[in-house]
Amino acid sequence: MQSTASLQQERMAETRLPLILDLDHTLLNTDLLYEAVVAFLRQKPWQAYKLALWLMKGKAHLKQRLSEAVSLDLEHMPLNEDLVTFARFEAEGGRPVHLATAANETVARRIVENLDFIDEVHASSASTNLKSATKAAYLAERFPGGFIYAGDSTADLPVFAAAEKSILVHPSSRLIERTDKISDIHTVFPRERPSLRFALKVMRLHQWAKNALLFVPLILGGLAADPMAWASAFAGFIALGLMASATYLLNDMWDLDSDRRHWSKKYRPLASGRLRITTALALIPAGIGASLAIAAAIGPSVVVALLGYLVVTLSYSFYLKRVPFLDTAVLATLFTLRLGIGVTLVSVPPSPWLFVFSMFLFLSLSLAKRYTEVMRNGLKGKTSSIHGRGYVEGDDPVLMAFGSASGVAAVLVMVLYLTNEAFKAGFYSMPVALWGLPIILFLWLGRIWLMCQRQILDDDPVVFAVKDRASLAMGGMMGIFFLAAWLGGHVG
């Protein structure tokens, strides 16, 4: 049996073992190589060919050139707060803490500038990629007395084998099994279990509510009792939803820096690091491919319509979102394109009134979204410009003026539509009930802009409306007025 003094000496010796932290998906909830690639493509897309040329000379060379070509927003990178807390506690207890990473040395040193518990940085140079067996050999030579290593992937297995103890960060069950055979596992930081809720968040399924616009041409075109029309519209709804989910992911990847500075968007799966960039890169083409496959089964015209939606969305994500007012006009166009796809799905004559109404209505809501961003940016004491957007503090009066005017224009267009087209349509048995629609619309838009002015509106008015009881009640009332107009005379 060991004496108390012997146990204390053993504990002191174990405490002197340095704690070595990996960086990508360990200390950080992201991978700096892929972050740099995305940043390079965002800043210099016309030079994408250089990535292949640099990679041909090795990963270390690629990382070095990327560190010279782009400047990452390292201040807002998502940290693994659990591991940071653990490492800080160990450092306060007297244990040396080091960072050893395959990331470029310049980038790694910038990451730890605000992490005062890290004593030393070991990283890749222009000629050496400090990863796997290379890292294991380097650390064994640098720390001949032993070390504790924290890593996350199978590439770290040689390092785990060389370490006295291992800390596994978000490991798979397979990695735990393999590490347990070659090393003494000190601690495991378990990964988040896949859940339906997280999958729905990745897909932004709540945004699919916007695709309900596909059913509007079906209803207004007098096909509400046609099951084939409903089947076609529902298939289109799924296709557009998959396309939208894929493009939302691409948009989030392109907007990583901006989202991480945003009060609510920083919690999105990609910005927070809960979803890996590599996973997103696989999901994006899969979503687009599945969408186009469903569209092809419906008809070639639907494929063309979805490709048009894709082109406009990509144009918005890559550039147009940074142009004041044009960004909101493009958002309104995307909503109106949903109506156009709905017209294509059920083959009804397009209504110019409907498209003009849609443009004014969603222009108003898009401007409300930008107004909220400008106001909240000012309240939080941020810089004068809105990161990733073309607006600055002080633009709010102009945004409110154009936004509220667009809302009034939408109400006016609806009134003109009712008097010039809807009342003449043969499938309304009691068209006078339609007068309830512009009244409710006016009240709802007034409420939206009043909440904007009071700075209590969520980021997206459309998403807010789906969750807001008053908005849902008003939507229900509009549905009742429509049903009364359609069926009221027959019921009577």
Image (cartoon, helix red, strand yellow):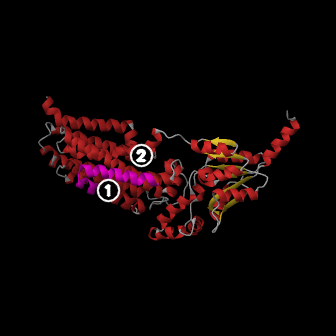
Residue 444 vs residue 128: left or right? left
Q: Secondary structure at mark 1?
A: helix
Closer-to-camera residue (277/54):
54
Quadrant of residue 400 within the rendered picture: bottom left
Q: Quadrant of the N terminus?
A: top right
Determine if the magenta segment contains residue 303. Answer: yes
Q: For mark 1, what is the residue?
A: 309
Q: Residue at x 64, y 45 (%)?
A: 179
Closer-to-camera residue (316/462):
316
Closer-to-camera residue (155/371):
155
Range of magenta residues: 281-305
x and y percent of residue 340 in the render? 25, 53
- Report the number of numbered marks: 2
Dot placed on the residue nearer the N-terminal end, 1 or 2: 2
Q: Which mark, residue 244?
A: none
Q: Is residue 247 visible?
A: no
Q: For mark 2, what is the residue?
A: 204
Residue 423 vs residue 154: left or right? left
Q: Main secondary structure of the magenta part?
A: helix
